[in-house]
Image (cartoon, rainbow, N blue to C red):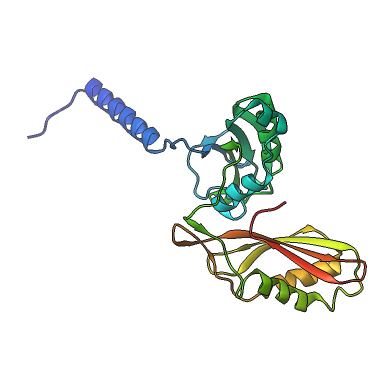
């Protein structure tokens, strides 16, 4: 038996189904609040300059991911003396955008504690290195975030984390770098170079970056030496392999003697 539904009832039924689908989509795509949250994403200008989407295919990433971000904040956040004397503590929530080129833009306070702490939170966020931008449909997109900066800075040392290790430890790494570079740096005096990289989950160096230059020739040699390093024992977080940032400082004194300093932290 075929039941005929009047036109007005068919229209009402269609409207109700559309409302249900819209509500379900919004609920399923609502992002939970946390220390770092995506708020919205703008599509490339050529598609629609004003259009905003809630979920993107590939989220922006800080160098070395969440571990790198936490370590960056731990190392670079300064707890102002005035704030210490006044007993000011808490979390400052900072809103910012990661542009299509990975730059941090439009930094502003979402929820502050006190102007002293708020200003320091803005400074440390504005000073962040470039992110890897988010991607949608194979194109970079502008994404906004809210990030919490804690005062005093959180102690990131944890029994759930272990840093990466060069075979033989830090001394062996310093010896390896010195042996590889000593001949090249004999004539370079009173110079300091700083180089950062990430030890990936497989124990290899990637994203090698010159933070402080010696000169273009030496910098290229240093980068090559770091690329050719033996495999490290990778970092672990909650017993799973993880990425970890490392910074190497290479110094020569007035006699051309070489010394190497290694930090398994994110240092600007």
Residue at image x 43%, y 37%?
Answer: 32
Q: Is 77 in front, or is 64?
A: 77
Q: How many marks?
A: 0
Please indicate whether residue 35 sits to the left or right of residue 218 in the image.
Answer: left
- Residue 261 is drawn in which quadrant? bottom right
Q: Is residue 223 above or below residue 98?
A: below
Please indicate whether residue 8 sits to the left or right of residue 215 in the image.
Answer: left
User: Where does residue 90 sit, x and y in percent of width and height?
Assistant: 57, 31
Residue 55 makes an appearance in the image = yes
Q: Is 130 in front, or is 171?
A: 171
Q: Is 116 in front, or is 2?
A: 116
Residue at image x 81%, y 62%?
Answer: 193
Q: Residue furthest left?
A: 1
Residue at image x 85%, y 69%?
Answer: 217
Please indicate whether residue 172 sits to the left or right of residue 256 in the image.
Answer: left
Q: Is residue 247 above or below residue 182?
A: above
User: Where does residue 264 sit, x and y in percent of width and height?
Assistant: 64, 60
User: Where does residue 234 sit, x and y in percent of width and height?
Assistant: 54, 67
Residue at image x 55%, y 70%?
Answer: 233
Q: Residue furthest front?
A: 85
Quadrant containing the N terminus in the rendered view = top left
Q: Is 65 in front, or is 163?
A: 163
Residue 209 makes an appearance in the image = no
């Amino acid at each position: 038996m075929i039941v005929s539904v009047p036109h007005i009832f068919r229209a009402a039924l269609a409207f109700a189904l559309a409302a249900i689908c819209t509500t379900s989509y919004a609920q399923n795509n609502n992002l939970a609040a946390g220390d770092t949250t995506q708020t919205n994403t703008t599509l490339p200008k050529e598609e629609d300059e004003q259009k905003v989407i809630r979920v993107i295919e590939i989220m922006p990433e800080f160098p070395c991911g969440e571990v790198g971000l936490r370590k960056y904040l731990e190392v670079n956040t300064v707890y102002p003396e005035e704030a210490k004397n006044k007993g000011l503590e808490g979390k400052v929530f900072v809103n910012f955008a990661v542009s299509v080129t990975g730059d941090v833009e439009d930094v502003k306070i979402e929820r502050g504690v006190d102007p002293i702490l708020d200003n320091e939170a803005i400074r440390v966020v504005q000073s962040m290195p470039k992110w890897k931008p988010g991607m949608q449909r194979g194109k970079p997109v502008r994404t906004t975030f809210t990030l919490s900066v804690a005062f005093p800075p959180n102690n990131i040392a944890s029994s759930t984390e272990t840093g990466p290790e060069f075979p033989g430890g830090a001394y062996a790494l310093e010896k390896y770098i010195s042996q590889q570079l000593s001949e090249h740096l004999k004539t370079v005096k009173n110079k300091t170079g700083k180089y950062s990289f990430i030890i990936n989950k497989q124990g290899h160096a990637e994203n090698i970056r010159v933070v402080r230059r010696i000169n273009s020739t030496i910098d290229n040699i240093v980068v090559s030496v770091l690329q050719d390093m033996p495999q490290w024992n990778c970092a672990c977080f909650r017993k799973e392999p993880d990425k970890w940032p490392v910074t190497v400082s290479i110094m020569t004194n007035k006699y051309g003697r070489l010394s190497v300093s290694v930090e398994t932290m994110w240092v600007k």
